[in-house]
Image (cartoon, rainbow, N blue to C red):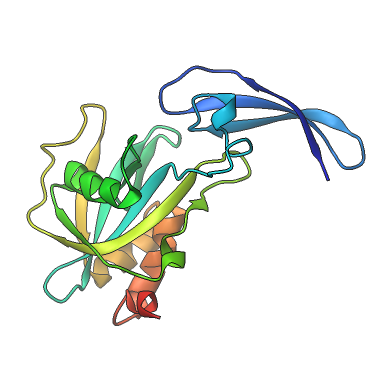
């Protein structure tokens, strides 16, 4: 099994930091591996923290009386320098459950109210988002959104447009726009499943 000989924190930022891992392969080759993490300290990294604390939530919410629309965000993302379609999402604050975060983030980012769908626990289990370069983990929360959209609660640095999309618009987005991986996967099912949440009822 490969070994990690040492871990050094290289940055000191509020939301994301870079760590250098001094590693040795199973065949004895040594090198450095760089990991981006939400952890504030080395001891909080997933490799050291057996609790494997969930960092954030993604919110897959249906909208409308027939639940035939989906809540999306078109957001400018600095790493790619352009707009991309995503589900509402956010970091979990200290003392919050991931479901409390989902309700708060839905309201802050869209102005909408979220009613969470209770489901088989495995569908909300914490999963890694990009394990080749980060130990960030995220839970997906499913629910129904209601109310009127609003941008009044956004942070000043956020450039987000709320999009309530029907199936025709979802198909257009998937064909022509930038879409995050986790969002695209669920939207593909949304296009063809009469009840997009049917899989949650097993």
Residue most extreme to the right = 27
* Nearer-the-camera pick, 94 or 161: 94
In this view of the protein, can residue 86 be seen by the observer? no
Query: Is 42 rendered above or below residue 87?
Result: above
Q: Which residue lies at the image location 49% right of the left edge and 17% below the top edge?
A: 12
Q: How many marks?
A: 0
| Residue 75 in the figure: left or right of residue 129 | left
Quarter of the figure that contains the C terminus: bottom left
Query: Is 36 rendered above or below residue 197?
Result: above
| Residue 128 image point, x, y percent | 53, 50
| Residue 91 in the figure: left or right of residue 71 | right
In this view of the protein, can residue 53 be seen by the observer? yes
* Nearer-the-camera pick, 14 or 171: 14
Q: Which residue lies at the image location 40% right of the left edge and 51% below the top edge?
A: 178
Quarter assignment of residue 163:
bottom left
| Residue 116 image point, x, y percent | 24, 62
Quarter of the figure that contains the N terminus: top right
Query: Is 67 rendered above or below residue 58?
Result: below
Residue most extreme to the left = 148
| Residue 3 in the figure: left or right of residue 93 | right
| Residue 141 in the figure: left or right of residue 156 | right
* Nearer-the-camera pick, 125 or 69: 125
Quarter assignment of residue 35:
top right
Quarter assignment of residue 81:
top left
| Residue 8 image point, x, y percent | 65, 20
| Residue 141 image point, x, y percent | 33, 58
């Amino acid at each position: 099994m490969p070994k990690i000989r040492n871990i050094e924190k290289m940055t000191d930022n509020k939301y994301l930091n870079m760590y250098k891992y001094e590693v040795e392969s199973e065949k004895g080759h040594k090198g450095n591996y760089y990991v981006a993490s939400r952890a504030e300290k080395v001891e909080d990294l997933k490799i050291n923290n057996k609790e494997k604390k969930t960092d954030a939530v993604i919110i897959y919410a249906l909208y409308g009386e027939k639940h035939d629309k989906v809540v999306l965000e078109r957001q400018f993302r600095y790493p790619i320098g352009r707009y991309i379609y995503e589900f509402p999402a956010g970091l979990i604050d200290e003392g919050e459950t991931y479901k409390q975060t989902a309700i708060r983030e839905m309201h802050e980012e869209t102005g909408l109210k979220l009613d969470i769908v209770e489901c088989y626990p495995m569908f909300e289990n914490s999963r890694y988002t990009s394990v080749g370069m980060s130990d960030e983990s995220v839970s997906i929360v499913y629910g129904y959104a209601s109310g009127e959209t609003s941008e009044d609660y956004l942070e000043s640095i956020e450039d987000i447009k709320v999009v309530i999309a029907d199936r025709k618009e979802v198909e257009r987005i998937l064909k022509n726009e930038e879409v995050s991986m986790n969002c695209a996967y669920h939207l593909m099912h949304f296009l063809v499943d009469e009840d997009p949440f049917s899989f949650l009822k097993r």
